[in-house]
Image: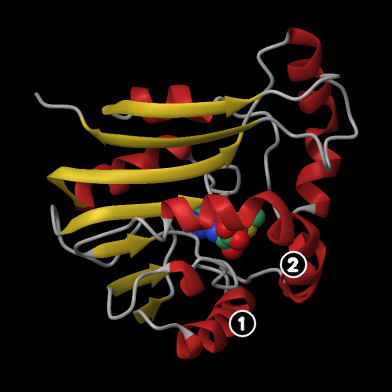
């Protein structure tokens, strides 16, 4: 991946208000509760790294070299042991069934192909493993969903390939996961601007047996 130099440069400043607000609790729950051998996908600038437990071994992957450079600084400050690798979610450089936990926050909006990326998450998780995710998703309301689709080209251009209109929880189920818990926040009104009012899904999924 060539990467998105400017998106990476402004990302932390752009997301700072959300990080000071609701995101810190989400990261505390998802990353703070991660255990065993942990893999993070699309780690970005490393916003989850401060929340992992002391001494936890985390392999953190990120394909964008500009994001990765910023993540290196956060990895050095983390109390967890972060092993950073440059890789897309659809091609993880790790063995089958080798992780207890996969963490992904705000990633499935950006991957090229959700089915491929989720198949990789499933491949690398142990049968007893858990995928912990937080994603912005498509409105269930048809007007909201249509507005997201209409704004998608501009949104993607401004957001380094981000898709605002994906049914990510459905994709997770379709990829062979059982979603054990999911909390979906659907703000109203279901219309743009979506900068501050995107619907989100926070959830926990395990590989379905069979
Ligand atoms: C909105 S940012 C989220 C970053 C971070 N996970 C967070 O919670 O702040 C989306 C991230 O997904 C990464 N990304 C884009 N395409 C990807 C892919 N194919 N596989 C994995 N990550 C990807 C981007 O480089 C970016 O770091």
Q: Which mark is residue 70?
A: 1
Relative to residue 134, is residue 19 depicted above or below? below
Q: Can residue 103 be seen in this view?
A: yes
| Quadrant for the C terminus in the image | top left
Q: Position of residue 156 (x, y in %)?
A: 76, 46
List the residue tagged with mark 2.
Answer: 11
Mark 1: give few (<14), some (14-19) or many (20+) Cα within 10 Å.
some
Q: Local crowd at mark 2 within 10 Å, few (<14), some, or many (≥20)?
A: some
The answer to whether residue 198 is left or right of residue 174 is right
Residue 20 position, x and y percent, is 72, 61
Of 146 and 139, nearer the camera is: 139
User: Could you say which is closer to the camera, residue 34 or residue 60?
Assistant: 34
- Closer-to-camera residue (8/34): 34
In the rendered image, is residue 7 in sight?
no
Q: Residue at point 77% right, 65% down?
A: 16
Disc 2 to disc 1: CB gap under 8 Å:
yes
Q: Position of residue 138 (x, y in %)?
A: 65, 25
Whether 117 is drawn above or below 203: the answer is: below
Cβ of mark 2 under 8 A from ligand 1? yes
């Amino acid at each position: 991946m060539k990467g998105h130099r400017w998106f990476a440069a402004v990302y932390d400043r752009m997301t700072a208000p959300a990080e000071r607000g609701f995101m810190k609790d989400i990261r505390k729950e998802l990353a703070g509760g991660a255990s065993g051998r942990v893999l993070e996908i699309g780690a970005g600038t490393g916003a989850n790294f401060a929340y992992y437990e002391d001494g936890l071994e985390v392999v953190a992957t990120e394909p964008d070299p500009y994001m990765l450079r910023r993540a290196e600084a956060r990895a050095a400050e983390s109390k967890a042991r972060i092993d950073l690798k440059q890789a897309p979610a659809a091609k993880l450089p790790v063995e089958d069934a080798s992780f207890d936990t996969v963490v992904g926050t705000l990633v499935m909006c950006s991957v090229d192909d959700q089915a491929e990326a989720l198949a990789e998450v499933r491949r690398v998780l142990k049968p007893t493993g858990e995928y912990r995710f937080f994603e912005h998703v498509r409105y269930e309301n048809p007007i909201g969903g249509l507005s997201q689709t209409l704004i998608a080209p501009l949104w993607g251009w401004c957001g380094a390939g981000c898709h605002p209109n994906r049914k990510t929880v459905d994709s997770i189920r379709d990829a062979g996961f059982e979603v054990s818990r999911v909390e979906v926040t659907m703000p109203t009104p279901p219309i743009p601007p979506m900068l501050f009012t995107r619907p989100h899904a926070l959830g926990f999924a395990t590989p379905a047996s069979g």
